[in-house]
Amino acid sequence: MAPHVSGGQTALILGVNHDQEDMVQVLLSCQAEVNLQYHNGLWVLMLACHLGNADLRCLLLAHLACDSSLTDKVMFNFWS
């Protein structure tokens, strides 16, 4: 499930971007695509790390489908 909204962003990306932990939990429970990458290769786990949101980072990492090995377009990943 990857509902696209303005600018090609998904509801999950917007939820992480706006620190909406409850929204992110609901979207994950509805099987939102956690590894879907934005146009620059950014994805929700990397965004949560970039924004410094440890709670969202832990929530995303606990989601079984989350792939922490993805890289963005300049080859940075979650571990970078």
Image: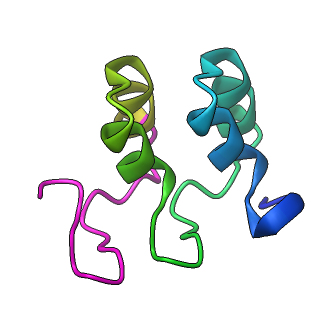
Answer with the quarter of the image where residue 28 lies. top right
* Residue at 32% in and 28% down: 52
Viewer-closest of 64 and 79: 79
Viewer-closest of 68 and 51: 51
Answer with the quarter of the image where residue 27 lies. top right
Instruction: From the viewer's perspective, tell me whether residue 6 is left or right of residue 65.
Output: right
Quick check: 30 above or below 77?
A: above
Residue 4 visible at all = no
Residue 73 on the magenta span: yes
Residue lying farthest to the left in this orientation: 80
- Image label count: 0
Residue 12 visible at all = yes
Please state the extent of the stretch shown in magenta in the rendering: 63-80
Quick check: 5 above or below 14?
A: below
Viewer-closest of 38 and 22: 38
* Residue at 35% in and 83% down: 73
Residue 59, given in percent of the width and then of the height, sits at 44, 27
* Residue at 33% in and 43% down: 50
- Rendered-image quadrant of the C terminus: bottom left
Residue 74, given in percent of the width and then of the height, sits at 26, 82
Residue 2 on the magenta span: no
Instruction: From the viewer's perspective, tell me whether residue 77 is left or right of residue 36.
Output: left
